[in-house]
Image (tube, rainbow, N blue to C red):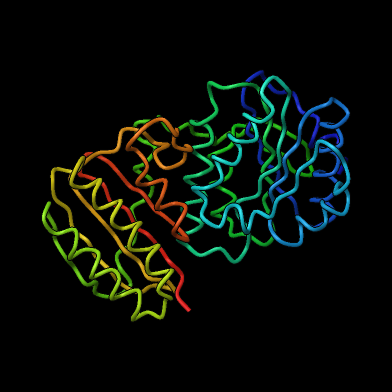
Amino acid sequence: MTAQAVVDPRYEPGFSHEAFFYTDPAEFLEASVSFVRDGLAADEAVLVAVPGRRAQWLRSFFGNERGVQVLDMADVGANPARIIPEWQDFLDAHEGRAVRGIGEPVWAGRSAAELAECVLHESLLNVAFESGPSWRLLCPYDAVGLPGSVIDQARATHPVVADAAGQRDSATYHRVPPQRALRGDPLPPPAEPPVELPFTGGDLSSVRRLVRRHCLEAGLTDARADDVELAVDEVASNSLLHGGGRGVLRVWPQDGSLVCEISDEGVISDPLVGRRRPLLDRTGGRGLWIANQLCDLVQVRSGAAGTTLRLHVRVP
């Protein structure tokens, strides 16, 4: 394989969303380093967000290079809903300058819930940046360490794919219309029978008490329980404002986390809700953003039947 075949593709002006399937660390490094060097040679600003050791490897190559920022995706993108704001902030900070990035949100060891949200994230990238400035995003995928179903989903969410054989248009790419983007795959049923509390306008204090009690029983600190209580309160308040004036809270433990789910009859029209940094001069519209910042994972599904949000918080 030559890195040139992977990192110097033909692409149209606009947002170029490219998946790169690598089979070993050498392939990852060769393609990533070449991609970054080409960007530097073109005087582009470059942001790299890859997990763990791969971030360390690239810092060793570019740690002192001006114009290159390397982040650990395991921190930045632990909750995939936080990734799009990072890219938007980087674009805004370099307005008027060409930009490229490397983003690896999917890695072996992610939970099933996290993988589902990574797929949604990759699909929403195409919505978030389709009408903005031209820039390139290369998304590496470990073709050996990840399940085949994950690789298939990557082909469906990236218009352009590349591997050792070179680059090509994805034959299975499917652009999801924005109005359908949050339907996603159905959320699986709770791992065990949940505690359930229907609520209306006068019941938010009961919602907060129930959540806090389960947080403390699960071993969370008071400070962490405060975070979860605030996140659930924000989401439940949205149910009262936009979901028909009522909702249902369900709480249960699952896979080392405490899950708080709020469902209502409302429909979310903005597929990027909670993934855009709120404007300081506007009131409202911050509930799901706050939940994404405070929780370890947030899942949103919304369609004609209503909206369900699951807030996951890791427990000791």
- Horizontal and vertical percent for residue 103? 66, 45
Q: Nearer the viewer, residue 286 or 128?
A: 286
User: Does 91 appear above or below 232?
Assistant: above
Residue at 63% x, 59% y: name it: 74
Residue at 82% x, 52% y: name it: 59
- Quarter of the image with the N terminus in it: top right
- Horizontal and vertical percent for residue 208? 25, 64
Residue at 85% x, 49% y: name it: 63
What is the quadrant of residue 302 in the picture? Answer: top left
- Horizontal and vertical percent for residue 281? 41, 30
Residue at 62% x, 26% y: name it: 15
312 to the left or right of 95: left
Q: How many marks?
A: 0
Outermost front residue: 281
User: Does 219 appear above or below 308?
Assistant: below
What is the quadrant of residue 155 in the picture? Answer: top right
207 to the left or right of 29: left
217 to the left or right of 237: right
- Horizontal and vertical percent for residue 67? 81, 36
Q: Nearer the viewer, residue 57 or 2?
A: 57
User: Does 264 appear above or below 277?
Assistant: below
